[in-house]
Image (cartoon, helix red, strand yellow):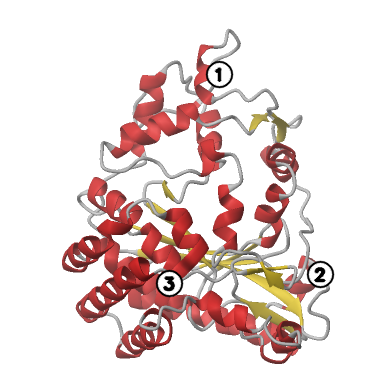
Protein backbone atom coordinates (compact mmCIF):
# COMPACT_ATOMS: atom_id res chain seq x y z
CA UNK A 1 0.00 0.00 0.00
CA UNK A 2 1.43 3.39 -1.00
CA UNK A 3 0.60 6.97 -0.21
CA UNK A 4 -1.46 6.98 -3.42
CA UNK A 5 -3.84 4.30 -2.16
CA UNK A 6 -7.54 5.02 -2.56
CA UNK A 7 -10.27 4.28 -0.06
CA UNK A 8 -11.17 1.17 -2.10
CA UNK A 9 -7.66 -0.29 -1.81
CA UNK A 10 -7.88 -3.72 -0.20
CA UNK A 11 -6.16 -4.37 3.14
CA UNK A 12 -4.99 -7.96 2.74
CA UNK A 13 -2.58 -8.56 5.62
CA UNK A 14 -0.88 -7.15 8.70
CA UNK A 15 1.78 -5.50 6.54
CA UNK A 16 -0.88 -3.36 4.89
CA UNK A 17 -2.16 -2.35 8.34
CA UNK A 18 1.36 -1.35 9.38
CA UNK A 19 1.77 0.68 6.19
CA UNK A 20 -1.41 2.56 7.15
CA UNK A 21 -0.12 3.00 10.70
CA UNK A 22 3.15 4.49 9.45
CA UNK A 23 1.22 7.13 7.54
CA UNK A 24 -0.19 8.24 10.91
CA UNK A 25 3.31 9.29 12.07
CA UNK A 26 4.70 11.71 9.50
CA UNK A 27 7.61 13.88 10.55
CA UNK A 28 6.43 17.49 10.55
CA UNK A 29 8.76 20.40 11.34
CA UNK A 30 5.87 22.68 12.31
CA UNK A 31 4.96 23.62 15.86
CA UNK A 32 1.23 24.09 15.51
CA UNK A 33 -1.22 23.33 18.27
CA UNK A 34 -4.93 22.72 17.88
CA UNK A 35 -7.37 22.55 20.77
CA UNK A 36 -10.81 20.93 20.89
CA UNK A 37 -12.99 21.89 23.84
CA UNK A 38 -16.08 20.04 24.99
CA UNK A 39 -18.51 21.69 27.39
CA UNK A 40 -21.66 20.64 29.17
CA UNK A 41 -24.49 23.17 28.97
CA UNK A 42 -26.95 23.78 31.81
CA UNK A 43 -30.16 25.71 32.21
CA UNK A 44 -29.42 28.41 34.77
CA UNK A 45 -32.88 28.26 36.34
CA UNK A 46 -33.09 24.45 36.38
CA UNK A 47 -29.60 22.91 36.40
CA UNK A 48 -30.92 19.36 36.74
CA UNK A 49 -32.90 19.69 33.49
CA UNK A 50 -31.44 18.47 30.21
CA UNK A 51 -30.89 21.19 27.58
CA UNK A 52 -31.78 20.20 23.99
CA UNK A 53 -28.90 20.78 21.62
CA UNK A 54 -31.24 22.62 19.26
CA UNK A 55 -31.86 25.24 21.93
CA UNK A 56 -28.10 25.73 22.28
CA UNK A 57 -27.52 25.93 18.55
CA UNK A 58 -30.20 28.51 17.89
CA UNK A 59 -28.67 31.09 20.24
CA UNK A 60 -25.02 30.73 19.29
CA UNK A 61 -23.61 33.63 17.22
CA UNK A 62 -21.05 33.44 14.41
CA UNK A 63 -17.72 32.61 15.98
CA UNK A 64 -15.09 35.32 15.39
CA UNK A 65 -12.09 33.03 15.80
CA UNK A 66 -13.12 30.50 13.16
CA UNK A 67 -13.73 27.48 15.39
CA UNK A 68 -15.79 24.57 14.10
CA UNK A 69 -18.89 24.02 16.22
CA UNK A 70 -20.31 20.52 16.67
CA UNK A 71 -22.34 18.56 19.22
CA UNK A 72 -21.60 15.27 20.93
CA UNK A 73 -24.32 12.61 21.33
CA UNK A 74 -25.56 13.96 24.67
CA UNK A 75 -25.70 17.54 23.45
CA UNK A 76 -22.23 18.51 24.70
CA UNK A 77 -21.00 21.56 22.82
CA UNK A 78 -17.63 21.14 21.09
CA UNK A 79 -15.50 23.99 19.77
CA UNK A 80 -12.56 22.96 17.60
CA UNK A 81 -10.21 25.89 17.22
CA UNK A 82 -8.07 26.54 14.14
CA UNK A 83 -4.56 25.12 14.55
CA UNK A 84 -1.68 27.54 14.69
CA UNK A 85 1.19 28.76 16.82
CA UNK A 86 0.34 28.60 20.51
CA UNK A 87 -0.48 32.33 21.00
CA UNK A 88 -2.67 32.49 17.90
CA UNK A 89 -4.47 29.23 18.64
CA UNK A 90 -5.33 30.35 22.15
CA UNK A 91 -6.34 33.88 21.11
CA UNK A 92 -8.73 32.68 18.43
CA UNK A 93 -10.32 29.92 20.48
CA UNK A 94 -10.65 32.22 23.49
CA UNK A 95 -12.62 34.66 21.35
CA UNK A 96 -14.98 31.88 20.34
CA UNK A 97 -15.44 30.56 23.87
CA UNK A 98 -16.19 34.09 25.09
CA UNK A 99 -18.71 34.64 22.27
CA UNK A 100 -20.46 31.33 22.94
CA UNK A 101 -20.42 31.82 26.70
CA UNK A 102 -21.91 35.31 26.46
CA UNK A 103 -24.67 34.28 24.06
CA UNK A 104 -25.62 31.31 26.22
CA UNK A 105 -25.62 33.45 29.34
CA UNK A 106 -28.03 35.90 27.69
CA UNK A 107 -30.29 32.94 26.88
CA UNK A 108 -30.29 31.69 30.48
CA UNK A 109 -27.79 28.91 29.80
CA UNK A 110 -24.44 28.12 31.41
CA UNK A 111 -21.34 26.86 29.62
CA UNK A 112 -19.74 24.50 32.12
CA UNK A 113 -16.26 23.00 31.97
CA UNK A 114 -16.31 19.74 33.92
CA UNK A 115 -15.26 16.26 32.84
CA UNK A 116 -18.39 14.37 33.97
CA UNK A 117 -21.91 15.68 34.37
CA UNK A 118 -22.28 16.23 38.13
CA UNK A 119 -26.08 16.43 38.18
CA UNK A 120 -27.92 14.81 35.30
CA UNK A 121 -28.26 11.21 34.11
CA UNK A 122 -27.03 10.24 30.67
CA UNK A 123 -29.47 11.22 27.93
CA UNK A 124 -28.62 10.72 24.28
CA UNK A 125 -29.97 13.33 21.93
CA UNK A 126 -28.27 12.58 18.59
CA UNK A 127 -29.48 9.47 16.79
CA UNK A 128 -27.09 9.26 13.87
CA UNK A 129 -26.49 5.72 12.58
CA UNK A 130 -22.90 5.60 13.84
CA UNK A 131 -24.06 6.64 17.31
CA UNK A 132 -26.73 3.96 17.30
CA UNK A 133 -24.09 1.35 16.52
CA UNK A 134 -21.70 2.77 19.13
CA UNK A 135 -24.37 2.79 21.82
CA UNK A 136 -25.29 -0.84 21.13
CA UNK A 137 -21.65 -1.94 21.18
CA UNK A 138 -20.56 -0.07 24.32
CA UNK A 139 -23.68 -0.87 26.33
CA UNK A 140 -24.96 0.43 29.66
CA UNK A 141 -24.18 2.20 31.87
CA UNK A 142 -20.67 3.25 30.88
CA UNK A 143 -21.25 3.52 27.16
CA UNK A 144 -24.10 5.94 27.75
CA UNK A 145 -22.05 7.91 30.28
CA UNK A 146 -19.10 8.21 27.90
CA UNK A 147 -21.23 9.31 24.97
CA UNK A 148 -23.58 11.65 26.80
CA UNK A 149 -22.10 12.80 30.10
CA UNK A 150 -18.37 13.33 29.60
CA UNK A 151 -16.42 16.33 28.32
CA UNK A 152 -12.73 16.73 27.64
CA UNK A 153 -9.99 18.95 26.32
CA UNK A 154 -8.15 17.45 23.36
CA UNK A 155 -4.77 18.96 22.55
CA UNK A 156 -3.51 18.24 19.03
CA UNK A 157 0.22 18.63 18.39
CA UNK A 158 2.52 18.33 15.40
CA UNK A 159 4.72 15.26 15.58
CA UNK A 160 7.91 17.25 14.97
CA UNK A 161 10.99 15.88 13.30
CA UNK A 162 11.18 13.00 15.83
CA UNK A 163 7.64 11.59 16.01
CA UNK A 164 8.58 8.72 18.34
CA UNK A 165 9.99 11.17 20.87
CA UNK A 166 6.80 13.20 21.15
CA UNK A 167 4.70 10.04 21.15
CA UNK A 168 6.63 8.72 24.13
CA UNK A 169 6.51 12.05 25.96
CA UNK A 170 2.75 12.33 25.59
CA UNK A 171 2.33 8.90 27.19
CA UNK A 172 4.92 9.22 29.95
CA UNK A 173 3.54 12.57 31.09
CA UNK A 174 -0.06 11.35 30.93
CA UNK A 175 -0.65 10.31 34.55
CA UNK A 176 0.83 13.54 35.91
CA UNK A 177 -1.31 15.68 33.60
CA UNK A 178 -4.42 13.61 34.37
CA UNK A 179 -3.86 14.33 38.07
CA UNK A 180 -3.07 18.02 37.56
CA UNK A 181 -6.25 18.65 35.56
CA UNK A 182 -8.58 16.09 37.18
CA UNK A 183 -11.97 17.80 37.21
CA UNK A 184 -14.79 15.26 37.42
CA UNK A 185 -15.36 13.98 40.96
CA UNK A 186 -19.18 14.01 41.00
CA UNK A 187 -22.07 12.06 39.56
CA UNK A 188 -25.67 12.46 40.62
CA UNK A 189 -24.59 15.37 42.87
CA UNK A 190 -22.46 13.00 44.94
CA UNK A 191 -18.78 12.09 45.01
CA UNK A 192 -18.10 9.20 42.67
CA UNK A 193 -14.88 8.13 44.40
CA UNK A 194 -12.59 9.48 41.69
CA UNK A 195 -11.01 12.87 41.11
CA UNK A 196 -11.37 12.15 37.40
CA UNK A 197 -14.61 10.23 37.14
CA UNK A 198 -14.41 10.73 33.40
CA UNK A 199 -11.25 8.62 33.27
CA UNK A 200 -12.96 5.96 35.38
CA UNK A 201 -15.81 5.80 32.84
CA UNK A 202 -13.38 5.33 29.96
CA UNK A 203 -11.51 2.63 31.88
CA UNK A 204 -14.71 0.58 32.16
CA UNK A 205 -15.31 0.49 28.42
CA UNK A 206 -13.87 -2.02 25.96
CA UNK A 207 -10.18 -2.04 26.87
CA UNK A 208 -9.12 -3.13 23.39
CA UNK A 209 -9.99 0.41 22.27
CA UNK A 210 -9.42 2.56 25.37
CA UNK A 211 -6.18 1.24 26.90
CA UNK A 212 -2.99 3.13 26.16
CA UNK A 213 -0.98 2.08 23.12
CA UNK A 214 2.43 0.79 24.26
CA UNK A 215 5.13 3.46 24.23
CA UNK A 216 8.90 3.22 24.14
CA UNK A 217 9.20 1.11 20.99
CA UNK A 218 8.37 1.63 17.34
CA UNK A 219 5.16 3.69 17.55
CA UNK A 220 3.91 2.78 14.08
CA UNK A 221 4.39 -0.95 14.68
CA UNK A 222 2.72 -0.65 18.09
CA UNK A 223 -0.21 1.28 16.60
CA UNK A 224 -0.58 -1.35 13.88
CA UNK A 225 -0.81 -4.11 16.49
CA UNK A 226 -3.36 -2.07 18.42
CA UNK A 227 -5.46 -1.62 15.27
CA UNK A 228 -5.31 -5.33 14.55
CA UNK A 229 -6.20 -6.48 18.07
CA UNK A 230 -9.01 -4.01 18.75
CA UNK A 231 -12.52 -5.40 18.51
CA UNK A 232 -14.64 -4.24 15.61
CA UNK A 233 -17.36 -1.87 16.77
CA UNK A 234 -19.35 -1.62 13.55
CA UNK A 235 -19.04 -2.28 9.87
CA UNK A 236 -19.73 0.71 7.66
CA UNK A 237 -22.02 -0.22 4.80
CA UNK A 238 -22.49 1.76 1.63
CA UNK A 239 -25.56 4.03 1.45
CA UNK A 240 -28.44 2.90 -0.67
CA UNK A 241 -28.05 6.09 -2.70
CA UNK A 242 -24.40 6.46 -3.87
CA UNK A 243 -24.98 10.19 -4.32
CA UNK A 244 -25.66 10.56 -0.58
CA UNK A 245 -22.50 9.28 1.15
CA UNK A 246 -23.65 10.84 4.40
CA UNK A 247 -26.44 8.25 4.54
CA UNK A 248 -24.03 5.37 5.18
CA UNK A 249 -25.34 2.64 7.46
CA UNK A 250 -23.45 1.05 10.34
CA UNK A 251 -23.96 -2.57 11.32
CA UNK A 252 -22.91 -3.34 14.91
CA UNK A 253 -20.46 -6.21 15.34
CA UNK A 254 -21.63 -8.43 18.18
CA UNK A 255 -19.32 -11.46 17.99
CA UNK A 256 -16.21 -9.92 19.59
CA UNK A 257 -14.14 -10.25 16.43
CA UNK A 258 -11.11 -8.05 15.89
CA UNK A 259 -9.75 -6.39 12.80
CA UNK A 260 -7.15 -9.18 12.66
CA UNK A 261 -9.99 -11.69 12.55
CA UNK A 262 -11.56 -9.85 9.66
CA UNK A 263 -8.30 -10.04 7.70
CA UNK A 264 -8.28 -13.83 7.97
CA UNK A 265 -11.99 -14.34 7.31
CA UNK A 266 -13.06 -15.82 4.00
CA UNK A 267 -15.32 -12.91 3.20
CA UNK A 268 -14.28 -9.81 1.23
CA UNK A 269 -11.06 -8.28 2.57
CA UNK A 270 -11.54 -4.91 4.24
CA UNK A 271 -10.66 -1.76 2.36
CA UNK A 272 -8.61 1.25 3.33
CA UNK A 273 -11.90 3.02 4.05
CA UNK A 274 -12.85 0.21 6.46
CA UNK A 275 -9.52 0.46 8.28
CA UNK A 276 -9.72 4.25 8.44
CA UNK A 277 -13.19 4.04 9.98
CA UNK A 278 -12.04 1.36 12.43
CA UNK A 279 -9.26 3.69 13.60
CA UNK A 280 -11.80 6.43 14.35
CA UNK A 281 -13.65 4.07 16.72
CA UNK A 282 -10.56 3.55 18.90
CA UNK A 283 -10.06 5.91 21.83
CA UNK A 284 -6.65 5.41 23.46
CA UNK A 285 -5.33 8.24 25.66
CA UNK A 286 -3.00 9.29 22.82
CA UNK A 287 -4.03 8.64 19.23
CA UNK A 288 -2.01 9.28 16.05
CA UNK A 289 -3.83 10.95 13.16
CA UNK A 290 -0.91 12.48 11.25
CA UNK A 291 -0.52 14.52 14.42
CA UNK A 292 -0.83 13.64 18.10
CA UNK A 293 -4.26 13.69 19.68
CA UNK A 294 -3.83 13.98 23.46
CA UNK A 295 -7.21 12.83 24.72
CA UNK A 296 -6.81 12.21 28.47
CA UNK A 297 -7.57 15.68 29.86
CA UNK A 298 -10.78 16.57 31.69
CA UNK A 299 -12.71 19.64 30.55
CA UNK A 300 -11.77 22.76 32.50
CA UNK A 301 -13.48 25.98 33.52
CA UNK A 302 -14.15 28.10 30.41
CA UNK A 303 -11.56 30.62 31.60
CA UNK A 304 -8.93 28.02 32.57
CA UNK A 305 -8.59 25.77 29.53
CA UNK A 306 -5.64 27.78 28.07
CA UNK A 307 -3.52 26.64 31.02
CA UNK A 308 -4.19 23.02 30.16
CA UNK A 309 -3.36 23.52 26.48
CA UNK A 310 -0.23 25.60 27.14
CA UNK A 311 1.28 23.26 29.73
CA UNK A 312 0.65 20.16 27.60
CA UNK A 313 2.09 21.83 24.51
CA UNK A 314 5.19 23.06 26.33
CA UNK A 315 6.01 19.74 28.01
CA UNK A 316 5.63 17.64 24.87
CA UNK A 317 7.24 19.92 22.29
CA UNK A 318 9.95 21.89 24.12
CA UNK A 319 13.05 19.73 24.59
CA UNK A 320 14.35 21.41 27.73
CA UNK A 321 10.97 21.40 29.39
CA UNK A 322 10.39 17.78 28.37
CA UNK A 323 13.69 16.61 29.82
CA UNK A 324 12.93 18.17 33.20
CA UNK A 325 9.32 16.99 33.18
CA UNK A 326 10.14 13.42 32.21
CA UNK A 327 12.74 13.12 34.94
CA UNK A 328 10.11 14.20 37.48
CA UNK A 329 7.33 12.06 35.98
CA UNK A 330 9.36 8.85 35.66
CA UNK A 331 8.28 7.48 39.10
CA UNK A 332 4.64 7.92 38.00
CA UNK A 333 4.92 5.89 34.80
CA UNK A 334 1.77 3.90 34.10
CA UNK A 335 -0.19 5.33 37.05
CA UNK A 336 -3.22 6.22 34.95
CA UNK A 337 -5.83 4.90 37.39
CA UNK A 338 -4.00 6.12 40.49
CA UNK A 339 -3.91 9.60 38.97
CA UNK A 340 -7.61 9.43 38.10
CA UNK A 341 -8.60 8.24 41.55
CA UNK A 342 -6.43 10.48 43.74
CA UNK A 343 -5.39 13.41 41.58
CA UNK A 344 -2.89 15.77 43.17
CA UNK A 345 -3.80 14.51 46.64
CA UNK A 346 -1.27 11.79 45.90
CA UNK A 347 2.13 13.10 47.12
CA UNK A 348 4.09 11.40 44.34
CA UNK A 349 1.91 12.86 41.61
CA UNK A 350 1.87 16.29 43.28
CA UNK A 351 5.67 16.45 43.40
CA UNK A 352 5.89 15.43 39.76
CA UNK A 353 3.25 17.95 38.73
CA UNK A 354 5.04 20.73 40.60
CA UNK A 355 8.25 20.03 38.68
CA UNK A 356 6.33 19.78 35.39
CA UNK A 357 4.64 23.13 35.90
CA UNK A 358 7.95 24.77 36.77
CA UNK A 359 9.42 23.37 33.55
CA UNK A 360 6.43 24.63 31.55
CA UNK A 361 6.64 28.09 33.10
CA UNK A 362 10.28 28.32 32.09
CA UNK A 363 9.51 27.18 28.54
CA UNK A 364 6.43 29.21 27.70
CA UNK A 365 8.13 32.63 27.26
CA UNK A 366 10.62 31.19 24.76
CA UNK A 367 7.71 29.54 22.94
CA UNK A 368 6.02 32.90 22.37
CA UNK A 369 3.41 32.70 25.11
CA UNK A 370 2.06 36.04 26.22
CA UNK A 371 2.88 37.34 29.70
CA UNK A 372 -0.81 37.06 30.54
CA UNK A 373 -0.84 33.35 29.69
CA UNK A 374 2.31 32.73 31.72
CA UNK A 375 0.62 34.46 34.66
CA UNK A 376 -2.46 32.26 34.23
CA UNK A 377 -0.30 29.13 34.35
CA UNK A 378 1.50 30.41 37.46
CA UNK A 379 -1.83 31.22 39.13
CA UNK A 380 -3.16 27.72 38.36
CA UNK A 381 -0.01 26.19 39.82
CA UNK A 382 -0.33 28.26 42.98
CA UNK A 383 -4.01 27.44 43.40
CA UNK A 384 -3.94 23.74 42.52
CA UNK A 385 -0.52 22.19 42.08
CA UNK A 386 1.49 23.53 45.00
CA UNK A 387 -1.19 22.71 47.62
CA UNK A 388 -2.04 19.37 45.96
CA UNK A 389 -5.62 20.30 45.05
CA UNK A 390 -6.77 19.19 41.63
CA UNK A 391 -9.62 21.32 40.23
CA UNK A 392 -11.89 18.46 41.31
CA UNK A 393 -11.32 19.45 44.94
CA UNK A 394 -13.28 22.67 44.38
CA UNK A 395 -16.26 20.67 43.11
CA UNK A 396 -16.10 18.27 46.04
CA UNK A 397 -16.32 21.19 48.43
CA UNK A 398 -19.70 22.11 46.94
CA UNK A 399 -21.24 18.81 48.03
CA UNK A 400 -20.13 19.04 51.67
CA UNK A 401 -22.05 20.32 54.65
CA UNK A 402 -25.77 20.32 55.29
CA UNK A 403 -26.61 22.26 52.12
CA UNK A 404 -26.45 21.09 48.54
CA UNK A 405 -24.55 24.04 47.11
CA UNK A 406 -23.73 22.65 43.67
CA UNK A 407 -27.00 23.48 41.85
CA UNK A 408 -27.24 26.98 43.33
CA UNK A 409 -23.62 27.72 42.65
CA UNK A 410 -23.90 26.53 39.06
CA UNK A 411 -27.08 28.49 38.47
CA UNK A 412 -25.69 31.72 39.86
CA UNK A 413 -22.13 31.65 38.65
CA UNK A 414 -21.60 29.09 35.90
CA UNK A 415 -18.16 28.61 37.34
CA UNK A 416 -17.67 24.87 36.85
State the quadrant of the C terminus.
bottom right
SS type, badge 1:
helix
Q: Indicate the position of residue 160 as horizontal and vertical percent values.
A: 24, 54
Q: CB atoms at circles 3 and 1 under 8 Å apart? A: no
Residue labelled with disc 2: 50
Using the rendered view, name the quadrant where residue 356 is placed.
Answer: bottom left
Q: Indicate the position of residue 18 as horizontal and vertical percent values.
A: 36, 28
Q: Indicate the position of residue 14 as horizontal and vertical percent values.
A: 40, 20
Q: Residue furthest top?
A: 266
Q: Nearer the viewer, mark 3 or mark 2?
A: 3
Q: How far apart are marks 3 and 2 (CA)?
A: 31 Å
Residue labelled with disc 3: 344
Q: Residue at left 79%, top 58%?
A: 123
Residue 403 is at least partly visible in this image: yes
Q: Residues within 10 Å of mark 1 (few under 14, many from 20)?
A: some
Q: Residue at left 37%, top 41%?
A: 24
Q: Residue at left 61%, top 78%?
A: 396
Q: Indicate the position of residue 316 as horizontal and vertical percent values.
A: 28, 61
Left or right position of 136 against 303: right
SS type, badge 3:
helix
Residue labelled with disc 1: 262
Pointer 2 or 1: first along the chain: 2
Q: Residue at left 60%, top 23%?
A: 257
Pointer 3 or 2: first along the chain: 2
**Which sits in the foreground, 416 or 18?**
416
Amino acid sequence: MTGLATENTLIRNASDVEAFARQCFPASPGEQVGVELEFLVFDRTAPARQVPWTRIAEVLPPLPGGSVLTFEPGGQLELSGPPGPLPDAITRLTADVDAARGALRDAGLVLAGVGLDPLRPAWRQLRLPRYEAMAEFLGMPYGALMMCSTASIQVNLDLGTRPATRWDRAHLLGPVLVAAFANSPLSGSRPCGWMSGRQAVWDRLDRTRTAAVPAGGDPAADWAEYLLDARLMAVREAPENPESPGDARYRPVRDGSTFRDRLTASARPPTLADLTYHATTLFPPVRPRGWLEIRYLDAQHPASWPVCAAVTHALVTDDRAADAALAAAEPCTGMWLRAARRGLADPLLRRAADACFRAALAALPRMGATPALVCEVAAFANRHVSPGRSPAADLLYLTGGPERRLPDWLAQEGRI
